Image (tube, grey):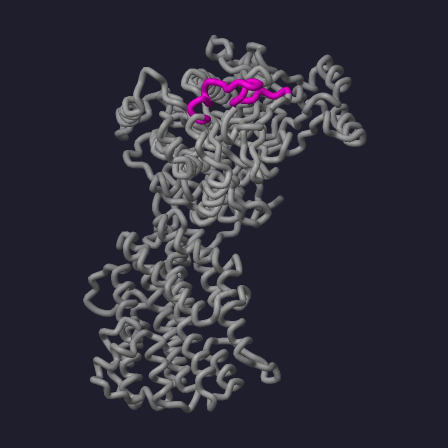
């Protein structure tokens, strides 16, 4: 080994994406070659510039009111074209299935009658909202934006860890990371042919406009944020700015006679599509939490009346429930008649008596996850838990088995990461973002690679000290970057001219 | 434009201007105290704090370091430069999606210098110079990157109203010590107006002409009348009404009346009780701000939803 990767050892059971033992894996050949001249002090100084730039630009997230720069590792993660096209197809398949499932759940519920999934899985979910029953979105889309979390198992195979179809966040960092890394490693970046990520806001805006209520020729799109103290406020502002639309808070909106208006210096102006980054429960105090000031009273009724589109749709939470996740392979076969392209992580439902027995026997070697949790909350990693924690967990599982699923400890793959002046293997996951405009599910090439910065740590969430990496999806050999871009532009433009007759889709 | 965003822009304008003008006032006053042994520290400092709107108990000991703490360094004192710059940044953060990237980054890096303690560690003249430089950078960036839409007019309106208010305070400080002419010279210097003043009045320095220049000059951008004029124009641009008589906007009426009064009264009359006149100006600024808030921003007041029954 030469240069900076000398002495790098990844000898755990986890799959290292750069090295197979001593030998370099193909996707990283160019990267190592390109970095061979870079000395550690030079690298250190570039890392410092990187962090200072993020603070100056205000690329931050909030933890308990404190603004922190989002940690960005200087070394990118590289994904080859072939690997990516499989991920892309798998994500598209997943999103199409989730759309079909949601449409079914909030309509006839055929899937229950056909015995693919028990009805009680849905009716007992806290994310099932009757308010959404019978509501048909204008262009049939409920999952305008999704983030499907992937991990790579010990054999290097990508698996789905969870689906996020409510308000997945993190896409802003994909864009800012790219800008920062392409500046910090300019020469290396230039030597690779990397698929661009900057087109995301236009894709999103196009999908949001396409989702406007029927008969609105030139819809007004807004981004709804809980406000400046929300952890993802930076992202909300970035998306609004790059889409050129207003960023509103609940108090900027007023609903009357089934329509939603925003308060401007010139009086009230109508709003047609709300890309909301506020959870269902806080959207509308009339229907949900009466103490919420984050939404606007009357929003749900306006949406039900078909005068405004809420994206993502209300009630999507039933589909990314961790219990529904266990049925996803069956749902893919049921709705699409296809085999899953990306497999789930092996999962036991504690609600099934047989599975429960096994899980309770092996509590100390499994990961237990609450069905309703997100962001790593409530997860118990068996091998790392104390006796007392395991006993407490056992009690909880026996008391309410339906609320728990179990998975083997998935050794997330590792990628070389520069922490405190040293290079070492750190665990990563991947969240590709998909945008559905009703015609096509488009997957942003790359997505957010989150990395657990502490050695051996498996939880990558930023709230638990995780950082991120720029994710380089290499362009395929058959197409040049320019061709791909042109093709994407064309796809974007053809259906984008909005017409008053949109809405012939059901 | 969203009312809430308009309000944020208005306050960015005010806070940046406030930070700059406070630095200018402190620069003059600290220099005076250091250079001139005849100036008494305690009463001058007390007067300065009072002009800047801070109430100090008579038994509290007041000295220059306390003044600097209250008006420059302290992040919790509402009259300090540190507070104004932090508040400008907080407003900018709320309006971030409407600001140009360079504009946001300029305001954000300014705030980061405060937050990191670097500002406090500067020596006083350098610190004030730094504040003036940053304000110039923010204003210049705004000028170069913002479209001249409503947002721009709100930003300018905030800046102009604050400038009227702060220039009136600066003028009021000249009556703090009995220095007369020398004090006016420093005040003019604080505004960067000394040379312009000398050229305009052909080297004839009198207290009267200095006051006239700072209050009434129609061409000097930091004079009260100039700033009032600009503020009026901003409101007019926002209203864009072609009314044949009167004004729809209360703010426009208030600002215009104040300007007319200053311009059409005899200078001797205005100067006869300068501190009182300056307070009147400050009151007008406060009323105009209220009027602007009612007319353009009040729609952004939070509605509370009260659940009935449960």
Asked if residue A475 can be seen in this view, the reply is yes
Q: Is residue A38 left or right of residue B254?
A: right
Which image quadrant is residue A247 in? top left
Q: Position of residue A407 (x, y in %)?
A: 65, 20
Q: Is residue B87 above or below residue A446?
A: below
| Residue at image location 49% in from the left, 47% down from the top | A227
Q: Position of residue B189 (x, y in %)?
A: 34, 78
Residue nearer the viewer, A89 or B302: A89
Residue nearer the viewer, A190 or A318: A190
Q: Is residue A17 magenta?
A: yes
Asked if residue A132 can be seen in this view, the reply is no
Task: Give the mark count.
Answer: 0
Q: Is residue A154 magenta?
A: no
| Residue at image location 42% in from the left, 24% down from the top | A30
Q: Is residue A348 above or below residue B109?
A: above
Which image quadrant is residue B223 in? bottom left
| Residue at image location 41% in from the left, 65% down from the top | B131
Q: Is residue B22 left or right of residue A343?
A: left
Which image quadrant is residue A6 in? top right
Q: Is residue B285 left or right of residue B195?
A: right
Q: Is residue B64 left or right of residue A397?
A: left
Residue nearer the viewer, B7 or A68: A68
Q: Is residue A76 above or below residue A478?
A: below
Q: Position of residue A195 (x, y in %)?
A: 37, 26
Residue nearer the viewer, B276 or A402: B276
Give the quadrant of the C terminus of chain A. top left
Q: Which residues are magenta?
A: A13-32
| Residue at image location 51% in from the left, 12% down from the top | A340
Q: Is residue B126 above or below residue A450?
A: below
Q: Position of residue A143 (x, y in %)?
A: 45, 27
């Amino acid at each position: 080994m030469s240069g900076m990767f000398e002495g790098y050892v990844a000898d755990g059971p986890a799959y290292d994406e750069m090295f197979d033992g001593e030998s370099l894996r193909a996707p990283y050949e160019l990267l190592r070659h390109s970095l061979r001249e870079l000395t550690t002090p030079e690298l250190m100084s570039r890392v410092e510039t990187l962090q200072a730039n993020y603070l100056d630009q205000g690329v931050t997230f909030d933890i308990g009111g404190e603004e922190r720069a989002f940690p960005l590792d200087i070394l990118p993660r590289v994904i080859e074209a072939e690997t990516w096209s499989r991920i892309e197809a798998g994500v598209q398949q997943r999103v199409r299935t989730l759309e079909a499932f949601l449409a079914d759940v909030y309509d006839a519920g055929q899937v229950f009658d056909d015995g693919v999934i028990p009805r009680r899985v849905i009716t007992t979910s806290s994310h099932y909202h009757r308010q959404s029953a019978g509501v048909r979105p204008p262009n049939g889309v409920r999952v305008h934006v999704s983030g499907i979390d992937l991990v790579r198992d010990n054999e290097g195979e990508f698996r789905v860890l969870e689906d996020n179809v409510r308000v997945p966040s993190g896409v802003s960092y994909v864009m800012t990371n790219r800008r920062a890394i392409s500046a910090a490693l300019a020469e290396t970046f230039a030597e690779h042919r990397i698929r661009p990520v900057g087109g995301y806001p236009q894709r999103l805006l196009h999908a949001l406009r396409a989702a406007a209520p029927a008969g609105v020729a030139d819809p007004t799109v807004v981004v709804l944020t809980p406000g400046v103290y929300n952890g993802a406020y930076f992202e909300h502002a970035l998306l609004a700015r790059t889409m050129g639309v207003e960023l509103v808070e609940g108090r900027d909106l007023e609903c009357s006679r089934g329509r939603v208006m925003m308060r401007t210096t010139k009086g009230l102006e109508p709003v047609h599509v709300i890309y909301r980054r506020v959870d269902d429960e806080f959207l509308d105090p009339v229907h949900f939490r009466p103490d919420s000031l984050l939404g606007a009273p009357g929003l749900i009724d306006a949406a039900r009346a078909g005068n405004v589109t809420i994206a993502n749709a209300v009630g999507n939470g039933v589909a990314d429930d961790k219990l529904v996740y266990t049925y996803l392979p069956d749902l893919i076969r049921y709705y699409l008649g296809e085999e899953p392209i990306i497999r789930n992580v092996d999962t036991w439902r504690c609600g099934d008596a047989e599975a429960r027995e096994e899980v309770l026997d092996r509590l100390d070697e499994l990961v237990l996850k609450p069905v309703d949790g997100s962001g790593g909350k409530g997860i118990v990693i068996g091998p790392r838990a104390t006796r007392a924690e395991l006993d407490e967990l056992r009690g909880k599982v026996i008391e309410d088995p339906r609320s728990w699923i179990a998975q083997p400890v998935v050794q997330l793959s590792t990628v070389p990461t520069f922490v405190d002046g040293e290079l070492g293997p750190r665990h990563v996951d991947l969240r590709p973002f998909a945008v559905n405009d009703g015609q096509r599910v488009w997957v942003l090439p790359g997505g957010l690679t989150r990395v657990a910065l502490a050695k051996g740590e498996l939880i990558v969430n930023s709230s638990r000290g995780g950082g991120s990496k720029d994710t380089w999806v290499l362009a395929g050999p058959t197409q040049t970057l320019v061709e791909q871009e042109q093709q994407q532009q064309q796809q974007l433009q053809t259906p984008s001219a909005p017409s008053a007759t949109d809405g012939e889709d059901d | 434009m969203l009312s809430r965003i308009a309000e944020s822009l208005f306050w960015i304008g005010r806070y940046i201007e406030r930070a700059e003008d406070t630095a200018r006032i402190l620069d003059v006053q600290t220099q005076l105290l250091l250079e001139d042994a005849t100036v008494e520290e305690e009463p001058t400092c007390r007067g300065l704090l009072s002009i800047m709107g801070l109430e100090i108990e008579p038994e509290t000991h007041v000295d220059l370091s306390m003044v600097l703490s209250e008006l420059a360094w302290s992040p919790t004192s509402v009259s300090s430069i540190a507070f104004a710059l932090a508040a400008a940044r907080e407003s900018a953060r709320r309006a971030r999606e409407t600001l140009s990237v360079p504009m946001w980054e300029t305001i954000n890096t300014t705030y980061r210098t405060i937050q990191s303690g670097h500002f406090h560690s500067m020596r006083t003249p350098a610190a004030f110079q730094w504040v003036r430089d940053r304000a110039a950078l923010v204003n210049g960036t705004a000028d170069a990157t913002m479209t001249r839409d409503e947002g721009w007019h709100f930003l300018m309106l905030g800046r102009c109203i604050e400038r009227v208010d702060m220039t009136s305070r600066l003028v009021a400080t000249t009556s703090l010590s009995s220095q007369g002419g020398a004090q006016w010279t420093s005040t003019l210097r604080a505004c960067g107006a000394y040379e312009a003043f000398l050229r305009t009045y052909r080297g004839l320095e009198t207290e009267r002409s200095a006051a006239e220049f700072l209050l009434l000059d129609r061409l000097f951008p930091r004079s009260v009348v100039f700033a009032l004029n600009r503020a009026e124009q901003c409101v007019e641009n926002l209203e864009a009404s072609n009314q044949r008589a009167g004004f729809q906007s209360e703010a426009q009426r208030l600002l215009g009346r104040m300007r007319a009064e200053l311009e059409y009264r005899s200078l001797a009359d205005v100067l006869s009780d300068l501190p009182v006149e300056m307070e009147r100006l400050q009151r007008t600024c406060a009323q105009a701000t209220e009027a602007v808030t009612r007319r353009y921003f009040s729609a952004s007041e939070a509605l509370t939803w009260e659940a009935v029954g449960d």
